[in-house]
Amino acid sequence: MEPPSSSRVQKSFLKYQHVFVFLAPVLFVSGVYLFAPTGDVSGGYWFEYWWLSVFFLMGATIVNTVGISGSALFVPFLIFIFPLLAFPLEPETIVKVGLISESFGLSSSSIAFIQYGLVDRRLALTIVGGSVPFVVGGALLSFIIPEPLFHLALGGALLAASYLLFRADLGHEEPSSESDPEPATDGGSPELPNDDDKLGPAGVETDADGNVTRVDREGDNYRYTRGGYIERFANYAVGGTFQGLAGFGSGELGIISQLRTEVPVRVAIGTNHIIVATTAILASLVHVFGGGFVGGHSLSLASTPWNIVVWTVPATVTGGQIAPYVSNTLDTGTIKKGVGGLFAVIAVALFLMAASGVGLRLGLGS
């Protein structure tokens, strides 16, 4: 029996997703070059910041490997490092560059993780549904809460998340590929699931008791449950609020709840991509359109540094495609230490940002 046309389309898209993914930045850069409001610029304008592609490629690979927001690294980089190499950017410009770059990188990596079979879409849907009001509320609060205050709060939350991650027992997550039977290539077997619509032996099956058996594209299998909704809801509620306030926080705080409720690390990372991408887009829309309604800031395309984003967008897309392979190569302990250490570094950067903001306000006040 021939599979439905929608199944063939899905499998073909996943098989050749890298082609469609890399077409996106090509079209974006072409559109920017032809239609962006840049004024009268010379050819050297477009190549002035080519070196940013190196930093954003590394940053996108790191954040997408561990399943957190790209802005968690991009924003501190643009605040602290970029001025040393070029010139200081306005806060609204940093937001725009971060949002544009992050949206492409997250979309690229999300599709790559889906292709790899490491995304629990049912789990992601329930988390996103619960996070929406908190993301919107946080984004609206951002127009009235001083920026240093929520940078300080988010830094404290990330330090707590780093501590919880190092304390978490992740022994349950290790994939198995040796002791279990191989998934059948004819649609599955009683032991392990297989899905004809997916690449390789990938598949997922949930029994009557809610136990999930997931097989990725390489044949590694993971067993877990979707229990622990209350803890995940609490973490993603707090993280969603920070996502709206500061542009990141949902992925950084939320992934801890998945790991603590025994979702395998690689599945948690893959699933978190969908959650972070959706909440980031929602927060971005509120930031873009909400300021006009409450008297806050708004984003202007005319002031966007297009000669920067033409390099950061292709870099983040490439990093997003590399991330699943890096994640699958590293062992659980390395990922845990890397994520925990990264959270601590970001927290320190946030404390510095908060202190800088307070100092600036005091200086203006005097």
Image (tube, rainbow, N blue to C red):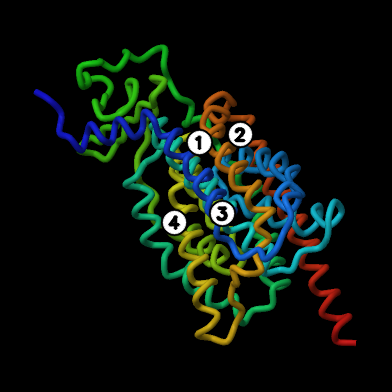
Q: CA distance from mark 1 to mark 3?
A: 14 Å
Residue annotated with mark 3: 253
Q: Secondary structure at mark 4?
A: helix
Residue 104 position, x and y percent, is 52, 49
Q: Quadrant of the C terminus?
A: bottom right
Residue 234 position, x and y percent, is 47, 61
* Horizontal arrangement in the rendering, residue 320 relative to residue 275 (left or right): right
Q: CA distance from mark 4 to mark 3?
A: 15 Å
Which of the two discs, 4 and 3, labels the residue nearer the N terminus? 3
Residue annotated with mark 4: 278
* Horizontal arrangement in the rendering, residue 117 relative to residue 174 (left or right): left
State the residue in front, 125 or 173. Answer: 125
Q: In the rendered image, which quarter is residue 93 located in? A: bottom right
Q: CA distance from mark 2 to mark 1?
A: 8 Å
**Three-letter code, disc 2:** Ile
Which of the two discs, 3 and 2, labels the residue nearer the N terminus? 3
Which of the two discs, 1 and 4, labels the residue nearer the N terminus? 1
Q: Residue at x 68, y 38 (%)?
A: 58
Q: Which mark is residue 265?
A: 1
Question: Which of pointers 4 and 3 indicates the residue nearer the eye?
Answer: 4
Residue 6 position, x and y percent, is 20, 38
Q: Which mark is residue 335?
A: 2
Q: Are marks 1 and 4 in contact (CB under 8 Å)?
A: no
Q: Are marks 2 and 1 in contact (CB under 8 Å)?
A: yes
